[in-house]
Amino acid sequence: MKVHYLVCFDISDDDVRLKVGKSLLRHGQRVQESVFEIALSSANELLRLQRQLISILEEENELRFYRLCRDCRKASHRIDGLQLATFPAVVII
C-alpha cells in the first residue's frame, strides 16, 4: 500500500526549485506552486527521494514532508469541492 505525503518547500533559487519540482513530479502531482501530493511504496523509497533532494538543496532551503493518513485524506477537500489528487493503484509502463 502506498503512503501519501504532502511536500511543501520554500526555495528562492529558480534552478534548485525546478530540479526539486521535477523530482517530486516523478512521485505525484503539483497541487500548488511549491506544494506536491506524492505517493511512495516504502520507507526505502522515501529515504531515496529525501537523499536525492538533499543533494539538490542549498543550506537555506526549507522542504517538509507531511504524512497523510488514509482518514486524513478522506477528510480533506478543496474549497471548490473538486477532488484531491488521486493516484492509481497500479501503473503500467
Image (tube, grey):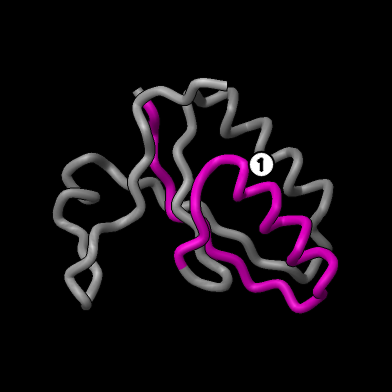
Q: Residue at x 39, y 46 (%)?
A: 67
In the displayed structure, would residue 54 be above or below residue 32? above
In the displayed structure, would residue 83 be above or below residue 93? below
Location of the C terminus (image quadrant):
top right
Query: Identity of the amino acid at label 1?
Result: Gln
Q: Which residue is drawn at 61% across and 49% down?
A: 24
- Callout 1: SS: helix
Q: For the magenta stretch, what is the residue range?
A: 2-31
Q: Position of residue 92 (x, y in %)?
A: 50, 21
Q: Nearer the viewer, residue 2 or 93?
A: 93
Dividing the picture into quadrants, the one containing residue 10 is bottom right
Q: Is residue 11 magenta?
A: yes
Write down the residue under mark 1: 50
In the displayed structure, would residue 1 be above or below residue 5? above
Q: Position of residue 63 (x, y in %)?
A: 62, 60
* Residue 37 in the figure: left or right of residue 64: left
